[in-house]
């Protein structure tokens, strides 16, 4: 009992002394799976495959095969930044599924010009080296049916985060997500708590004296070792699927609301304590073979071009998908920024079912 109390005290002390960042580990908010991205990330209630390890672990229980693999590669900002995702989900028994996911978001071969000028003040381009800025995460997820409550599924993900800035510095982080789904008649309700315990990133820096001197002479702040905290957020969602024309056509609609409690954000629903960002996604399917998807998200209040008032902006996404036997290929035209056509990217993801179907 004393050990438990000590751990709780250390956790509280660490949380109070750490730097709470409103926008931290943002690479984990980009999203995985072209299906979800095409639906503007409105996906926590309808997700039913290996990508549930990221979106809502409870959705892993809808996996039909014994083993499922998921892959995605994306390039943003004209190929400067690369985003890679790979995951595998394994059904343990009729009531539980486990999943392992890996995410990497990186900018490679960045020129390092700190040593561009030698000790004599001469510019020497041969002194330029390169480094990589990489954000990576491993998610270990587990989901289980709650037998005593019909229709209830829960799941959780433990995540390990590694962020590096070449040889200059890096951080290790740890956190946890918890999600649940509940089926009521033809409706499905979902809740997802991201970074529910607070995700801690411990940053350390290793700068040479020459690098520190360059930072000082150029007016840049020399970074110090610190702990950064990603605060929790709660995502609520509801979805329902409708069938038409002898069930040849299906229409799935999902609504999500991302709730944050770290002060006012640029969302359409906001207060000094709580802010809510709505998302809406739809999927039209034909015979479970081909799908068309669309969504609206990133709905925010922003200053207009004149700077004399606010306007509501939004981000439309769209995509298609094909499912044939054990393969599912999805495509999305999506943006990770501000509705600028220059930032829209073509995203592809692949899903493969392995082994016989689970019965």
Image (cartoon, rainbow, N blue to C red):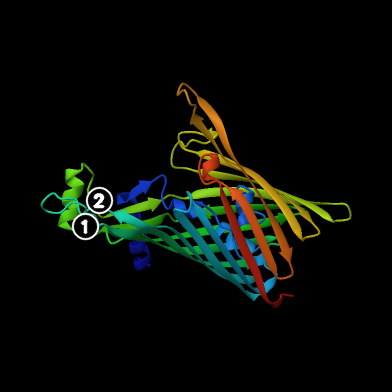
Q: Is residue 146 visible?
A: no
Q: Residue at x 72, y 60 (%)?
A: 322
Q: Residue furthest top?
A: 308
**The label number, if any, that marks residue 326 in the structure image:** none
Q: Nearer the viewer, residue 355 or 271?
A: 355
Element type at mark 1:
loop
Q: Is residue 267 visible?
A: yes
Q: Position of residue 193 (x, y in %)?
A: 53, 53
Q: Residue at x 47, y 57 (%)?
A: 82
Are the two marked residues, 2 and 1, in contact with CB atoms closer than 8 angstroms?
yes
Q: Residue furthest right?
A: 246
Q: Residue at x 30, y 50 (%)?
A: 17
Q: Which residue is mark 2?
A: 223
Element type at mark 2:
loop
Q: Residues within 10 Å of mark 2 (few under 14, many from 20)?
A: some
Of callouts 2 and 1, which one flags the residue occurring earlier in the amino acid sequence?
1
Name the image quarter holding the C terminus. bottom right
Q: Residue at x 24, y 55 (%)?
A: 125
Residue 141 placement, left or right of 133: right
Q: Position of residue 51 (x, y in %)?
A: 59, 62
231 vs 86: above or below: above
Q: Position of residue 139 (x, y in %)?
A: 49, 65
Q: Residues within 10 Å of mark 1 (few under 14, many from 20)?
A: some
347 vs 275: above or below: below
Q: Position of residue 138 (x, y in %)?
A: 47, 65
Q: Which residue is mark 1?
A: 207
137 vs 97: above or below: above
The image quarter containing residue 218 is: top left
Q: Nearer the viewer, residue 289 or 130?
A: 130
């Amino acid at each position: 009992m004393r050990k438990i109390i000590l751990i709780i005290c250390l956790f509280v002390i660490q949380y109070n002394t750490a730097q709470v960042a409103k926008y931290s580990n943002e690479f984990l908010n980009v999203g995985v799976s072209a299906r979800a991205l095409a639906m503007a990330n409105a996906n926590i209630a309808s997700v039913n495959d290996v990508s549930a390890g990221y979106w809502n672990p409870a959705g892993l229980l809808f996996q039909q095969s014994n083993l499922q693999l998921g892959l995605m590669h994306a390039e943003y900002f004209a190929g400067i930044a690369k985003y890679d995702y790979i995951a595998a989900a394994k059904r343990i028994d009729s009531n539980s599924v486990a999943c392992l996911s890996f995410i990497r978001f990186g900018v490679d071969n960045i020129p390092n010009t700190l040593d561009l000028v030698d000790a004599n003040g001469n510019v020497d381009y041969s002194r330029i080296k390169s480094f990589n800025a990489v954000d990576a995460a491993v998610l270990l997820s587990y989901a289980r049916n709650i037998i005593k409550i019909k229709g209830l599924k829960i799941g959780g993900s433990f995540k390990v985060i590694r962020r590096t800035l070449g040889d200059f510095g890096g951080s290790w982080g740890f956190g946890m997500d918890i999600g649940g789904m509940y089926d009521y008649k033809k409706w499905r309700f979902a809740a997802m708590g991201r970074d529910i315990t607070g995700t801690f990133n411990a940053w350390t820096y290793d700068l040479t004296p020459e690098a520190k001197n360059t930072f000082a002479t150029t007016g840049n702040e020399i970074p110090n070792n610190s702990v950064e905290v990603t605060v929790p957020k709660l995502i609520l969602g509801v979805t329902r699927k409708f069938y038409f024309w002898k069930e040849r056509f299906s229409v799935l609609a999902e609504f999500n609301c991302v709730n944050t409690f770290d002060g006012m954000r640029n969302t359409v629903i906001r207060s000094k304590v709580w802010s809510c960002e709505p998302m809406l996604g739809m999927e039209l399917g034909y015979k479970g073979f081909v799908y068309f998807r669309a969504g609206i998200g990133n709905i925010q209040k922003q200053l207009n071009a004149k700077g004399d008032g606010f306007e509501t902006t939004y981000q439309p996404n769209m995509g298609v998908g094909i499912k044939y036997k054990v393969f599912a290929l999805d495509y999305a035209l999506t943006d990770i920024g501000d509705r600028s056509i220059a930032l829209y990217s073509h995203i592809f993801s692949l899903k493969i079912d392995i082994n016989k179907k689970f019965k």
